[in-house]
Amino acid sequence: MVDFGTAWYQNIWYLVVPNQCVYFNLALITGTVMRLLYVVACIITLVGCSKEIEHSAPPIRPIAWTAVKTSNFEQVRTLSGIVAPVENANLSFEVNGKVEKVFVKLGDTVSKGQPLAKLNQLTFQLSFESASAQVKQAEATLQEAQNEYERYKTLSEQGLVSKSGFDNSKSAFESAKSAVDVANAQLNIARKNVQDSELLAPYDGVITKRLIEPSQQVAAGQSVFEIEGQHGFEVRVMVPESIIHDLNSDMTLKVTYPVMPQLSMKGHISEKGTRAESANAFPVTVILDEENSVLRAGMTAEVEFVYQGVGRTGYTGPSIRIPVSALGADIKQKAFVFVFDPKTQLLEKRFVQTENVINNQVIISNGLKDGEIIATAGVAFLRDGQKVSLLDNAVQRFN
């Protein structure tokens, strides 16, 4: 049996069930139901009062751009080389001997004819004195043979001596003259050896190597010094076979130095090898047209060779260079760019003929005209006929 009743306090109801009694708050239940009804009524009101959503026009997209220019189809190849002096020589004695004195040190500046080193003079002086004595002996023998010849000649003319005796005196005289010539030659050799025992600077320059010390025994032809002249520097570079035929002596070349980025000089080709050396490269010598006191032999230099280019299609005329980012790829390996029309502000997808890629720039031979404006970024997100605006190139942007 179920029985309903009211507790002695307000709004508390109870439900009597066999063996138990359940209490509940009628005011709390009523408040919750009212709040739910209020929320539903608000939603219905908002739905009924809402207007139809208007679809706005898509925004005009700004693009990065550049105006293309026509230029010569020139290519630039930068090759590394080594700075070397124009005048450079290994110095050596022309005779054997023991070093007696060394007059210069590494890095010394010397003048032409200045003594650099000297060998022990005793042996050379003795040889010179011996050669001098032999000359005197040969001259005395010649004088005796000449007197004998003249006497026999006079007697022969008078018929007082035999023909054979006259011939013998004549032969002895000729032989004595030859002996004098030989003795004089030996004397000249001895004199030259004395001179060669002292090494002199061949020209004004700087000593870049010193390979001898006093009391050291040296052989003829052994390198003892290296001297560097003061007539400027040159750059020796190996040029690949692909461009060697495009180079000539009239070219003005730009020379830079990795250790001194701020230094830039000009030079010209003075020598071009006719036979390939390592890796099918040809030796080329570039004379620097300027002088700079900071340069040193052995430094690394970079030479820019600018020459008339030939495209992959054989094209050699005027061309237009565009950034790689401005180029798009289409089917059948075709390339295109988006050209901006200032009047309509619309993009035109235009196919172009590419010839080469140099320093992140694509060389175009056909498809663009001088002064046209093209998009240079985000090509994959553009479309033909799209309306766009141009970004202000004076504003610096960061990625």
Image (cartoon, rainbow, N blue to C red):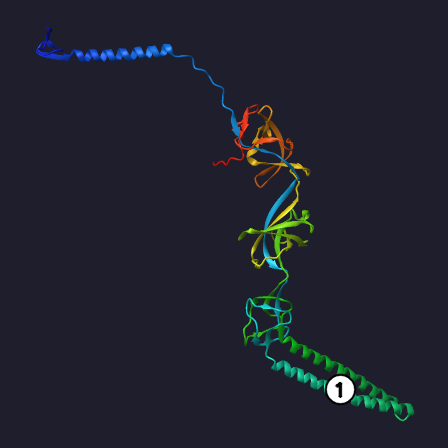
Residue 171, image x, y percentages: 82, 85
- 26 with respect to 163 (left or right): left
Q: Of 10 and 140, which appears nearest the observer?
A: 10
Residue found at the far front of this picture: 394
* Front residue of this view, candidates 13 and 172: 13
- Name the residue located 66 percent from the left edge and 52 percent from the top edge: 268
Residue at the limit of the structure toward the bottom, as seen here: 160
Q: Residues within 10 Å of mark 1 (few under 14, many from 20)?
A: some
Residue 342 on image: x %, y % = 59, 26
Asked if residue 212 shows in the view, the reply is yes
| Image quadrant assignment for residue 344 | top right
Residue at figure coordinates x 73%, y 87% from the top left: 136
Residue 109's quadrant in the figure?
bottom right
Q: Toward the viewer: 203 or 170?
A: 203
- Count the marks: 1
Name the amino acid, label 1: Glu
Name the residue tied to disc 1: 139
Image position of 298 (left or right of 174): left
Q: Position of residue 293 (x, y in %)?
A: 58, 59
Q: How far from the left and from the top, in percent, is residue 289?
A: 64, 55
Q: Is residue 131 left or right of residue 175?
A: left
- For the N terminus, the quadrant is top left
Residue 19, placed above or below residue 380: above
- Say what secondary structure mark 1 lies in: helix
